[in-house]
């Protein structure tokens, strides 16, 4: 299990893990990965920005990686609750998503660390 969220809202404690080549993540879409037992949804936005949040919606477990995104938010495909990708905050009254560190290193998407 991962550590508590730090004051900046990012959950640290996952081992830094290469989950995919950046080129294999289509811009504007998300993919779900298991990282040290944690289900993580990684989004590569059309701007090129990467975000990693919990892949499981806190409302009723919907698949966040399948949600529609814009430059700032993801909408859960099951009931439409909307979450800020940078902070995990829910804009529609549900509990927040966890947010994980994510970076590009040598053409790979690295989650955790
Ligand atoms: S399960 Fe995500 S909004 Fe209901």
Image: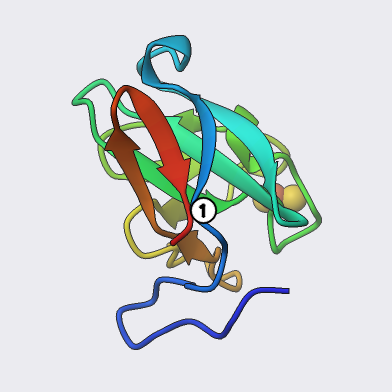
Indicate the position of residue 111 as horizontal and vertical percent values: 48, 48
Task: Find residue 46 and report its image quarter.
Answer: top left
Q: Is residue 8 depicted above or below 43 in this figure? A: below
Indicate the position of residue 73 as horizontal and vertical percent values: 37, 45
Residue 95 vs residue 24, the one in the foreground: 24
Q: Is residue 77 depicted above or below 86 in this figure? A: above
Q: Quadrant of the C terminus?
A: bottom left
* Left/right of residue 81 with respect to residue 38 in the rendered view: left
Determine which residue is flagged by label 1: 53
Say which residue appears at 48% left-offset and 57% top-offset.
Answer: 112
* Left/right of residue 61 with respect to residue 105 in the rendered view: right
Q: Secondary structure at mark 1?
A: strand
Q: Residue furthest left?
A: 47
Residue 16 vs residue 74, the one in the foreground: 16
Count the labels in the image.
1
Say which residue appears at 33% left-offset and 88% top-offset.
Answer: 7
Q: Is residue 21 depicted above or below 39 in this figure? A: above
Residue 68 vs residue 4, the one in the foreground: 4
Say which residue appears at 41% left-offset and 33% top-offset.
Answer: 109
What coloring was used for the rendering? rainbow
Task: Find residue 94 and report its image quarter.
Answer: bottom right
Q: Quadrant of the N terminus?
A: bottom right
Indicate the position of residue 57 as horizontal and vertical percent values: 68, 54
């Amino acid at each position: 299990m991962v550590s508590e969220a730090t004051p900046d809202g990012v959950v640290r404690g996952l081992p830094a893990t290469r989950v995919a080549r950046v080129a294999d993540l289509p811009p504007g879409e998300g993919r779900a990965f298991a990282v040290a037992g944690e289900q993580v949804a990684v989004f590569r936005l059309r701007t090129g920005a990467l975000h990693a949040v919990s892949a499981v919606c806190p409302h009723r477990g919907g698949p966040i990686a399948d949600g529609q995104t814009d430059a700032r938010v993801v909408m859960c495909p099951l009931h439409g609750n909307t979450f800020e990708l940078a902070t995990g905050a829910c804009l529609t009254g549900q509990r927040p998503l966890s947010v994980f560190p994510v970076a590009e290193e040598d053409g790979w998407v690295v989650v955790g660390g």
